[in-house]
Image: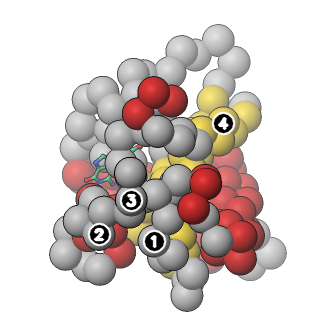
Amino acid sequence: MSYDNNNIFAKILRGELSAVTVYEDDATLAFMDVMPQSPGHTLVVPRYPAENLFDLDLTAGAAVLRTVQLVARAVKTAFNADGIMLNQFNGPAAGQTVFHFHIHIVPRYENVPLRRHTGDMEDSAVLQEQAQRIRAELARPGA
Ligand code: 5GP
């Protein structure tokens, strides 16, 4: 499969579809997953047009990992998570449903099961409030 410029995340990156953004820089964008597996579930994508790990430019990959670390710290604090799970799927057989490389940041709690992957849509007002908590944490001096 080759990279499809019309995938959902490419449209979000071009501003053709809206997303609840928590962080962006020259190389990456982080936004709320609309079907969160846990409150605070965030996605980080490179601006670089890679379908998956195998066609990802490594400079773009390094930028993604930097953003993942930054945002994961903020999510962990903002949602008082016991741990943070990162998920990254390559190919339909591995569970990938959107074909632009991305890393999931998912807050986890002791003995709390996850909601289903691509399960129920979250209310947009809830996502906005959660994103605000993450942005506030990112803006905190020393965070
Ligand atoms: P994948 O299955 O490819 O690893 O993950 C794709 C993720 O994108 C899923 O967790 C799904 O909930 C999320 N998703 C699907 N469509 C949209 C959308 O239009 N906007 C946002 N923000 N997330 C989406």
Whether pointer 2 and pointer 4 mark residues with C-beta atoms closer than 8 Å, the reply is: no
The amino acid at mark 1 is Pro
Decide which of 81, 54 is in the foreground and name it: 54
Whether pointer 3 and pointer 4 mark residues with C-beta atoms closer than 8 Å, the reply is: no
Quarter the C terminus occupies: bottom right
Q: Earlier in the sequence, mark 3 or mark 4?
A: 3
The amino acid at mark 4 is Met
Q: Is residue 72 above or below residue 137?
A: above
Residue pictured at 49% horizontal, 44% vertical: 41
Q: Is residue 143 above or below residue 88?
A: below
Whether pointer 3 and pointer 2 mark residues with C-beta atoms closer than 8 Å, the reply is: no
Whether pointer 2 and pointer 1 mark residues with C-beta atoms closer than 8 Å, the reply is: yes
In this rendering, position of residue 95 left or right of residue 57: left
Residue under label 4: 85
Q: CA distance from mark 4 to mark 1?
A: 24 Å
Whether pointer 1 and pointer 3 mark residues with C-beta atoms closer than 8 Å, the reply is: no
Residue under label 1: 49
Could you say which quadrant of the image residue 55 lies in? bottom right
**Residue 75 at x, y percent in the picture:** 61, 52
Instruction: In the rendered structure, find residue 2 and report the number of the disc placed on it.
Output: 3
10 Å crowding of disc 1: few (<14), some (14-19), many (20+): many
Residue pictured at 19% horizontal, 75% vertical: 16
The amino acid at mark 3 is Ser
Residue under label 2: 5
Q: CA distance from mark 2 to mark 1?
A: 8 Å
SS for callout 1: loop
Q: CA distance from mark 2 to mark 4?
A: 28 Å
The amino acid at mark 2 is Asn
